[in-house]
Image: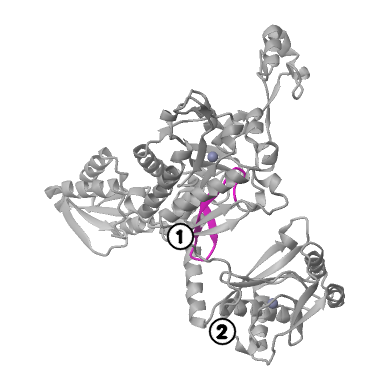
Amino acid sequence: MPVIERTVDKSSDIYKLRHSLAHVMAQAVQKLHPGVKLGFGPPIDDGFYYDFLFPEGVSITDDDLKAIQKEMQRIVKEDQPFVQEELGFEAAVARLEEMGEPHKVEYCRELHEQKGFETIGFYTNGPFVDMCEGPHVENVRQIKPDCFKLHSLAGAYWRGDERNVQLTRIYAWAFEDKKTLKAHEQNVIQARKNDHRLLGTKLGIYHIAEEVGKGLPLWLPNGGAVRKELEKLAYEFEFADGYRFVSTPEITREGLYYTSGHLPLYQHSMFPPMEIHEEGEAAVGDGAGEDVAAGGGDGAAESGAGAGREGGRGGGVERYYLKPMNCPHHHLIYRAEKRSYRDLPFRISEYGKCYRFERAGTLQGLTRVRGMCMNDAHIYVTPEQLKDEFKAVMDLHKRYYAIFGFENYFLRLSKWDPDDPTKGEKYVDDPAGWDYTERVVQEALEEMGLEYTVEKGEAAFYGPKVDYEFRTVTGREFTATTNQLDFAVPSRFGLVYTDRDGEEKTPYCIHRAPLGTHERFIAILIEHYGGAFPTWLAPVQVRVIPVSEKVVDYAKKVEKLLRGKLVRAEVDDSNNTMGKKIRSGTTEKIPVLLVVGEEEAGENTVTVRRYGIEEQRTMPLERFEGELVEEIRERRDVRRG
Ligand SMILES: [Zn+2]
Ligand SMILES: [Zn+2]
């Protein structure tokens, strides 16, 4: 069974190494900065970190990191075995208080009171003691002094809660040997160069304007071109797979979000409501309100501002929200007409705009935004169709990702947690429903031979889901898209279809977004390609470079011919030298530069220079055009072959 084991193997050498190094770092920091207090210090994917509370007035710089690293390198040459002891809860608290570690005392109490720990483990190496479960290397001498590097500082709230004190987190990389460490460092440097925030600006993809607001990107023409290509890709593939296309408004009356359950549960992630006063009539609320409005006429409207009270009978004020998701609207589209089993699977798709109120401090380039456009669709199916349709959606993901050449992603199946005491608030309470849907999803994954991990307690409120996780070169993981099975919401919305037997039944709903949101997906693509998009996706696909004034007309003729075939071609008729024009085309990572001189103009040919390929070729214009159009139509990435 192709399940990837991703839980950290605590007995592995690399885990022990990183974990031991965290102790060594804390020991070094305590020595160099007496009075420092400790937070947590776990191993992570590419090393480890430790959180510290430095004494008042002490702030740490990059120079301090070098000094700490040096001290660590000295420590690992000493003879310091890790010695374990187990203390009873009371003795453990007394020990931690004596050590002057308030955060550790708090965590120790939590282990005892909430998790039932009767004894608490401690490890001592040299002068350093830490509350810890291990395991470690036997002696710090086993650690190579050149296998780790302290690389950055960050602020981190104690327990990740912004109401708590802010600690200083020191991050380090650690690998089995110097060579692996160096290779990782190179990857990180490359990844920083590919950072979508850097390239996104350099390549004219997007812009964040203070006047528009945080997390609300403006898409520049080059970004607009990439969006259009993704929408075209989605349209073609979805069309072939039997989807139909819908469109929904971006603001909606609040009642819909009570039906969907977004209010009040999800309110913290929604923009605050707009209060709308309908002129000339009162609220279009419930039936009673409309009656009052009908009778009230203009008079009612004039007093409306004063009379408008929340939920007041006939009050003129109503709340509208920016939509945080497209699902509720799509459910209403399903419900707008009578459906029979013949209409199912009913697949509706929309690149829908959504708005979510993310905290300002968490916003980041295109990966965390407040306004987004989602490659959304909802598929309503009968129980018999459920598995095949789920597989069809997974297959769609696969076909998309093959085009992009994504390999560094994995799947995560999230299930509910029937043993969670707070499950009533987190999940629909329907054990049989969970059993059935989780089995269907798991079977779908197995039958398609896909690798996946299982996460208990990570399901959506309404059903299991499969997340597509991407890992960047630096080891950062994030969810790009998600594929969810919903067995609860359709009944909340009263969605039904008439089955063969004439009975009304409730469909299942699949929520899917293989291309995620434009924002997040394009951020991934920029970093994935390092800004050098394949021809089909590139904002400018062809730049024609006339070698002299005399051939500008020919260059324009080439441009016109290509644009007529929907190729994004343009002429560089600036006064720059040819060398400079070629260099700037390369800097902008344009896939095809066409150099044309008198010879080309005379023979109706072009000289083709492809991005990242040394060799240039001269060929008949007609042949070039045919080949290029074919390459774009097939969405081929010539660099991958
Ligand atoms: Zn430890
Ligand atoms: Zn949905």
- Local SS, label 2: loop
* Residue that appears at 49% across and 49% down: 441
Q: Which residue is mark 1?
A: 451
How far apart are the two marked residues, 2 and 1, measured between alpha carbons? Answer: 36 Å
Q: Magenta span has 171?
A: no
Dot label at residue 244 = none
* Residue that appears at 48% across and 30% down: 247
Q: In the image, is 294 to the left or to the right of 96?
A: left
Ligand 1 shows up in the quarter that is bottom right
Q: Which residue is mark 2?
A: 146
The percent position of residue 203, horizontal first and vertical second, equals 44, 52
The percent position of residue 397, horizontal first and vertical second, equals 42, 49
* Residue that appears at 68% across and 32% down: 273
Q: Is mark 2 within 8 Å of ligand 1?
A: no
Whether pointer 2 and pointer 1 mark residues with C-beta atoms closer than 8 Å, the reply is: no
Q: In the image, is 119 to the left or to the right of 495?
A: right
Can you tell which quarter of the image residue 54 is in? bottom right
Identify the magenta region.
459-482
Can you tell which quarter of the image residue 347 is in? top left
- Local SS, label 1: loop
In this view, the residue in front, 35 or 139, is 139
